[in-house]
C-alpha cells in the first residue's frame, strides 16, 4: 500500500515547512532518498514562506550526542532529574567519554536520592578526572547520605587536598563533624564557609532539624532545589553556590565571588557596581546574572531586575535563585503599590491618584499603575477614560488581572458580552457563549476593519460552534479572521480542528501545522496534528515528519506513537511496538484517546500494550486502573502469565490478598520464570525513594503473610532466596516472617542483611527496631 489510509501527501511540503517555519536543524538528518519521485505540492497556507526568496542558510545541526546532552542540561536545570538522567545516558552511549555528561550524570542520580548509583557514577567520573575535586566531593555527599560519616569525612579531606580553597569540601567536613557530635570542629570548618549572620541562622536551623533523632533524620539532598536541605541550606540563598557547583561548566570566578561578598554584607550599591563591572563573558554566566538581578532588586531597579529574572527563568527554570527572585520581585511591586491600593480601597481617589501617578512616572512600563488609574476613573463614573487606561494596561501586560477585572465591570456596554462569552466558553457553557458572542457581532459586524474585540468575538463564536458540532458555522466564523495577523494562531487552530472533526484530514494538516509553528506543542492541538498527518500523508512522508518532531521535542508522545503505527503498517511490527511503548512511557493517559482505543481494538498486539499500560499505572500508584488494563490483557490473551502476574500485584496493592495469592500462583504455574519487577517505596530519609526488586514469589509470600499464613510465606521467601540471595526484599520478608514465628535471632540477622544491601529501607529499620524490642522483653 502506498498510503497509511487513503490520501497521499507530499514529501517536499513537509521538508519545506519544517525547514522554513520550525527550524531546519532537525531536517538535516532525515532519512530521505533523492531517487524517489517528488509528488505534487499541496496548497498550504504558508504565505510568509513565499516571501523568503533568499532565506539564510540553516546552521549545521549538532551531533546526536551533543543534542542529547544539551537537552539533558535543560531538563537538569528545570529539576527534571529523571529525564536528564535518560538523555545523559543516551549521550554517553554515543560518546562514552563525554566529560560534561560524565560529570553531570552522578548529580542527576544524587538529586533523585539514588545514592548507590550516584556512588558508582562519581567513581567513574573520578577515574576519568583524577585531579578534579568535584567527583570526590560528590562521593563524600553520597556516603554522608548513606550515614557512613567516616567514609564521607575521608572523601571530603581528599578533595581538600586537591583544592585547599574548596568551600564545598570545607562545608562537607563541617557537617560531618556536626553529625558526629563534634560541635567545636563543626563550627571551625563551617565558619570558613559562612559569614557570622549565616552561621547564626544555620545554628538555629540545625536545632530545629534535630539531627540526632533517628525518627527525624536530616534531609541531605533535595528532590526539588526549592526545598531546604543540608546540601542546599537556606543560608545560601539567593546565590546557592552548592547547586552551581554541580553544573559541569562551573568555574570559580574571583570577581564574581567578590561581588557576592559585598551583597552578603548588604552593601547593595557597591555589589551592583561590582556586578556591572564584570568583564565579558564572565558577566553572562548564571551566577553573575543572578547576582546582578538581586542587586538591582535590592537597590530598587525593579524593571531591570524583572527583565533579567525573566531571561534566566527561560533557561534555568528550576534554579531557586531565580524562583525566589521572581517571588521577591512580585512582593516588591506589591509593596510599591500598597499605599495607592489602600487609599483606593478607602475611596480617597485623589490621594490614590497622586500615588499612582508617582508609580507611573517611576515605572512607565509597569501595567499596574495604568489599571489602577482605570479603577480610579471607573469609581468616579468616567467610564470612557477608565476604558482607555484599562486598554493601555493590557498593552503592557495582556494578561493583567486588574485590567481584565476592570473591563468586566462594563456590564451595560456591549464589550462586556465578549468577556462574558469568554467566561462561558471556558466553563463549557457553549450555548450561552454563542449567544453572547452573537449579540456583540450583530451590532458591530458592519465595521470595515476588524477591531480586536470583534476578532475575539468571531474566534470565540467559532470555538463555541465547534464544541457544539456545528462545523459549518464554525468554519464561517474562523474564516472571518483572515487577514488579522494577531489572530493567525486562533484562525488556523480553529480551522484545523474543525476540518479534523469533519474527517478532512489533508485540510486539517494544512492549518494545524501552521498553528503548531506559531505556538509549538499546544496540548489540545498536537495530538490532532499528528493523527491528521498519519491519516492524510503517505507512510514515508509521515515517517520523516514524525522523526523530525521526535528530534525537535523528545518529550512529545504522539510522534513516537505515530512512528510505531507507521512501522507496524509497513512490515516492521516489532520496531513499531517499541515506539508505541515509548509514547506510553511519556504519557500513559494517551490510551484514553478515541484514536488510540480504536487502533488497539483493531490490532493483534493490543494485549501486550495493555500489559505495559497496566504496569505504568501500577508504578503511578493507580492500582485500580492497572487492574482494569491487566484484565483486558487477560481477556485478549487468556494464557498471558504477565497479565496474571500484574493482576496479582494490583490485587496485593489493593489489599485483596485472597485474589492476589490466587493470581500469583496461577502466574507461577504458567511461567515459573516471570520477569522481576522493580517497585519504589518511601525511604528512611524524608523524600527518599528506594528501588526494590520483587518477583511473583516474594509478592505471593507477602499475600500469604498478610493472611496470617506465616509458614507458607516463609516457604516462598526461601524459594526466592535460592534464586536471588542479594535482594533486600527477600531478607526483609524473611525478617518479618521469622519475627512472627518468634525466631528472633534469625529475624535480626535477616534485617541486618537487608539494611546492609539497602541502608535506607524503611521497612527493615522498623523491623529491626521491633526485633530489638522483643529481645529486650525476653531478657526482662
Image (cartoon, rainbow, N blue to C red):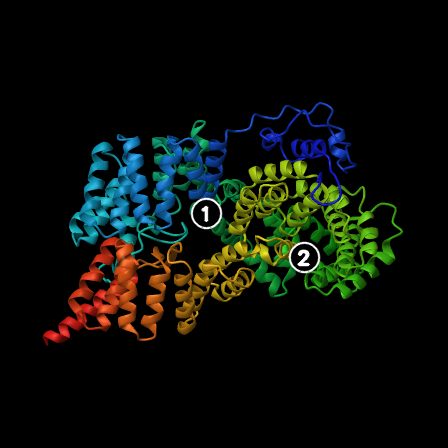
On screen, residue 372 versus residue 437, left or right, reads: left
Residue 507 in percent (x, y) is at 77, 44
- Gap between marks 2 and 1, in whole Å? 34 Å
Find residue 80 and name its label.
Answer: 1
Q: In which quadrant is the C terminus drawn?
A: bottom left
Q: In which quadrant is the N terminus drawn?
A: top right
Seen at 22% across and 47% down, the residue is 174
Residue 500 in percent (x, y) is at 74, 50
Seen at 79% across and 61% down, the residue is 434
Residue 178 can be seen in this image: yes
Q: Residues within 10 Å of mark 1 (few under 14, many from 20)?
A: some
Residue highlighted by disc 2: 404
Determine whether 678 is above or below 574 in the image: below
Determine whether 125 is above or below 759 in the image: above
Helix, strand or loop for disc 1: loop
Specify the quadrant of the image occupied by residue 707: bottom left
On screen, residue 644 versus residue 510, left or right, reads: left
Question: Residue 607 or 680: which is nearer the viewer?
Answer: 607
Question: Residue 139 or 779: which is nearer the viewer?
Answer: 779
Question: Residue 704 or 562: which is nearer the viewer?
Answer: 704
Earlier residue among tags 2 and 1 = 1
Amino acid at each position: 500500500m502506498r498510503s497509511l489510509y487513503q490520501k497521499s501527501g507530499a514529501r517536499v511540503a513537509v521538508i519545506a515547512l519544517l525547514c522554513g517555519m520550525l527550524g531546519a536543524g532537525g531536517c538535516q538528518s532525515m532519512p530521505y532518498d533523492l531517487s524517489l519521485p517528488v509528488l505534487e505540492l499541496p496548497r498550504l497556507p504558508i504565505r510568509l514562506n513565499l516571501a523568503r526568496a533568499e532565506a539564510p542558510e540553516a546552521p549545521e545541526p549538532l551531533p546526536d550526542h551533543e543534542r542529547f546532552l544539551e537537552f539533558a542540561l535543560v531538563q537538569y536545570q528545570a529539576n527534571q532529574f529523571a529525564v536528564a538522567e535518560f538523555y545523559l545516558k543516551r549521550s554517553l552511549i554515543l560518546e562514552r567519554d563525554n566529560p560534561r555528561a560524565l560529570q553531570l550524570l552522578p548529580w542527576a542520580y544524587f538529586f533523585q536520592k539514588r545514592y548507590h548509583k550516584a556512588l558508582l557514577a562519581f567513581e567513574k567520573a573520578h577515574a576519568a578526572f583524577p585531579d578534579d575535586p568535584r567527583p570526590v566531593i560528590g562521593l563524600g555527599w553520597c556516603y554522608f547520605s548513606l550515614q557512613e560519616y567516616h567514609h564521607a569525612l575521608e572523601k571530603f579531606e581528599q578533595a581538600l587536598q586537591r583544592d585547599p580553597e574548596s568551600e564545598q569540601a570545607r562545608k562537607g567536613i563541617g557537617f560531618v563533624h556536626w553529625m558526629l557530635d563534634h560541635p567545636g570542629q563543626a563550627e571551625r570548618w563551617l565558619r570558613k564557609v559562612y559569614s557570622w549572620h549565616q552561621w547564626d541562622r544555620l545554628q538555629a536551623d540545625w536545632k530545629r532539624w534535630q539531627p540526632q533523632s533517628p525518627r527525624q533524620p536530616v534531609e541531605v539532598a533535595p528532590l526539588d532545589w526549592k526545598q531546604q536541605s543540608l546540601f542546599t541550606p537556606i543560608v545560601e540563598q539567593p546565590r546557592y553556590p552548592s547547586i552551581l557547583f554541580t553544573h559541569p561548566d562551573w568555574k570559580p570566578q574571583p570577581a564574581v565571588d567578590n561581588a557576592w561578598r559585598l551583597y552578603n554584607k548588604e552593601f547593595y550599591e557597591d555589589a551592583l557596581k561590582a556586578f556591572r563591572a564584570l568583564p565579558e563573558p564572565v558577566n553572562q554566566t548564571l551566577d553573575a546574572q543572578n547576582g546582578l538581578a538581586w542587586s538591582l532588586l535590592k537597590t530598587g531597579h525593579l524593571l531591570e531586575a524583572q527583565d533579567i529574572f525573566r531571561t534566566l527563568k527561560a533557561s534555568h527554570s528550576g534554579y531557586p535563585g531565580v524562583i525566589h527572585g521572581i517571588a521577591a520581585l512580585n512582593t516588591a511591586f506589591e509593596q510599591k503599590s500598597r499605599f495607592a491600593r489602600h487609599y483606593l480601597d478607602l475611596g480617597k481617589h485623589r490621594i490614590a491618584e497622586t500615588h499612582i501617578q508617582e508609580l507611573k512616572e517611576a515605572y512607565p512600563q509597569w501595567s499596574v499603575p495604568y489599571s489602577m488609574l482605570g479603577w480610579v476613573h471607573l469609581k468616579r463614573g468616567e467610564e470612557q477614560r477608565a476604558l482607555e487606561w484599562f486598554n493601555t494596561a493590557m498593552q503592557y501586560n495582556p494578561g493583567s488581572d486588574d485590567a481584565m477585572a476592570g473591563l468586566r465591570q462594563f456590564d451595560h456596554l456591549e464589550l462586556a458580552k465578549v468577556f462574558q462569552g469568554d467566561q462561558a466558553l471556558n466553563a463549557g457553557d457553549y450555548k450561552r457563549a454563542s449567544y453572547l458572542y452573537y449579540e456583540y457581532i450583530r451590532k458591530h459586524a458592519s465595521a470595515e476593519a476588524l477591531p480586536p474585540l470583534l476578532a475575539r468575538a468571531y474566534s470565540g463564536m467559532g470555538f463555541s460552534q465547534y464544541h457544539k458540532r456545528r462545523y459549518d458555522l464554525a468554519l464561517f466564523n474562523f474564516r472571518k479572521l483572515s487577514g488579522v495577523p494577531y489572530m493567525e494562531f486562533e484562525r488556523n487552530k480553529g480551522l484545523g480542528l474543525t476540518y479534523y472533526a469533519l474527517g478532512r484530514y489533508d485540510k486539517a494538516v494544512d492549518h494545524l501545522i501552521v498553528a503548531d509553528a506559531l505556538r509549538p506543542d499546544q496540548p489540545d492541538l498536537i495530538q490532532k496534528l499528528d493523527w491528521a498527518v498519519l491519516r492524510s500523508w503517505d507512510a514515508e512522508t509521515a515517517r520523516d515528519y514524525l522523526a523530525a518532531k521526535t528530534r525537535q521535542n523528545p518529550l512529545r508522545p504522539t510522534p513516537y506513537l505515530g512512528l510505531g503505527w507507521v512501522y507496524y503498517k509497513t512490515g516492521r511490527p516489532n520496531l513499531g511496538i517499541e515506539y508505541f511503548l515509548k509514547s506510553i512511557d511519556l504519557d500513559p493517559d494517551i490510551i484514553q484517546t478515541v484514536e488510540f482505543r480504536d487502533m488497539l481494538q483493531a490490532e493483534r498486539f493490543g494485549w501486550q500494550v495493555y500489559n505495559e499500560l497496566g504496569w505504568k499505572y501500577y508504578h503511578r500508584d493507580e492500582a485500580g486502573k492497572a487492574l482494569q488494563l491487566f484484565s483486558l490483557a487477560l481477556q485478549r490473551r487468556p494464557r498471558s502469565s504477565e497479565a496474571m502476574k500484574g493482576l496479582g500485584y494490583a490485587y496485593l496493592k489493593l489489599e485483596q490478598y485472597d485474589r492476589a495469592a490466587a493470581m500469583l500462583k496461577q502466574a507461577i504455574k504458567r511461567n515459573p520464570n516471570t520477569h522481576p519487577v522493580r517497585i519504589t517505596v518511601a525511604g528512611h530519609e524524608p523524600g527518599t525513594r528506594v528501588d526494590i526488586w520483587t518477583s511473583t514469589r516474594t509478592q505471593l509470600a507477602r499475600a500469604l503473610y498478610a493472611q496470617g499464613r506465616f509458614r507458607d510465606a516463609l516457604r516462598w521467601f526461601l524459594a526466592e532466596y535460592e534464586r536471588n540471595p542479594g535482594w533486600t526484599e527477600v531478607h526483609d520478608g524473611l525478617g518479618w516472617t521469622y519475627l512472627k514465628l518468634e525466631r528472633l535471632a534469625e529475624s535480626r540477622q535477616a534485617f541486618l542483611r537487608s539494611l546492609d544491601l539497602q541502608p535506607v529501607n524503611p521497612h527493615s529499620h522498623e523491623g529491626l527496631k521491633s526485633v530489638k524490642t522483643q529481645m529486650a522483653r525476653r531478657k526482662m
